[in-house]
Amino acid sequence: MKHLLTILAVIIALSSAEAQERPLVQFSGIIYNVDSNVVVPYVSVTNKSDRYKAFSANYQGYFSFVAHEGDTVIFSAVGYRKEAIVIPDNLSDKSYTVVVKMKAQVINLPTVTVLPWASVDQFNKEFMALKFADDDMEIARKNVTRTSLLAIARELPRDGQEMRGINFQNNHVALTNKAINQRYANPLLNPFAWGSFIQQILQGDKRRGDSN
């Protein structure tokens, strides 16, 4: 056990010494969707070579942190495939800027059947209290009752043929009433008829006066 712990300590020390020997670099960049060229916000950025240190891009897809030359950086986000970038060695200005393009990943989820009952006992309870529907004859009888027909007539809009029949009937009634009123109009209520009658009387009296 002691030998195993010693070996692990040596490996960790060598890894740390190797990381310290590699030059530091300011690693920055912006992350886009490869299909739409829209930024991908809040992407998880993990430095695999430096004990999986995790960082995060901001809402504009921008990230920046200190890493080492030769580090492998992994980019991951929900709904996208993982991307990996290796920081090159021997950089002149000790900074490295990249444009990361991630591709959307479609994941087909298994079919889920949603049941309205939380348990078998609840299903049995609901089934025992279930009310069976009426037969076809009873349903048809209920559909043609006066209440049902009036409710349907209030809710359903009238079609073109029905509107044409109603308009024809209304026009027929209007014309019939107009003809009846014209035929049986009371002349005693007509002021023009009274005026004509008075003129005839005056003209008659004048003719009788002239003849005398």
Image: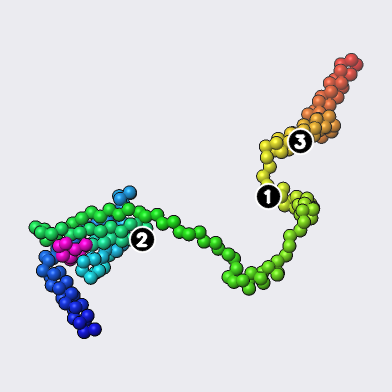
Residue at 18%, 74% (x, y): give it: 11
List x then y, in percent, for residue 79. Answer: 37, 58
Q: Which residue is mark 1?
A: 155
Q: Is any atom of residue 61 visible in this view?
A: no
| Residue 170: quadrant of the picture | top right
Colour mapping used in the image: rainbow
Q: CA distance from mark 3 to mark 2?
A: 68 Å
Q: Secondary structure at mark 1?
A: helix
Along the line of sight, which residue is nearer the eye, 131 or 123? 123
Q: Which residue is mark 3?
A: 169
Q: Secondary structure at mark 2?
A: loop
Q: Is residue 169 above or below residue 107?
A: above
Is label 3 or label 2 in front? Answer: 2
List x then y, in percent, for residue 70. Answer: 16, 62
Label 1 vs 2, first from the N-terminus: 2
Left or right of residue 108, residue 198 in this image? right
| Residue 26: quadrant of the picture | bottom left
Q: Check residue 78 in the rendering and tell me which mark sits there, or answer none.
A: 2
| Residue 9: quadrant of the picture | bottom left
Say what amino acid the circle numbered 2 marks: Val
Q: Is residue 68 magenta?
A: yes
List x then y, in percent, for residue 103. Answer: 32, 53
List x then y, in percent, for residue 111. Answer: 50, 59
Label 1 vs 3, first from the N-terminus: 1
Along the line of sight, which residue is nearer the eye, 55 or 169? 55
Say what amino acid the circle numbered 1 marks: Glu
Magenta span covers which residues? 64-72
Residue at 10%, 59% (x, y): give it: 90
Left or right of residue 57, residue 167 in this image? right
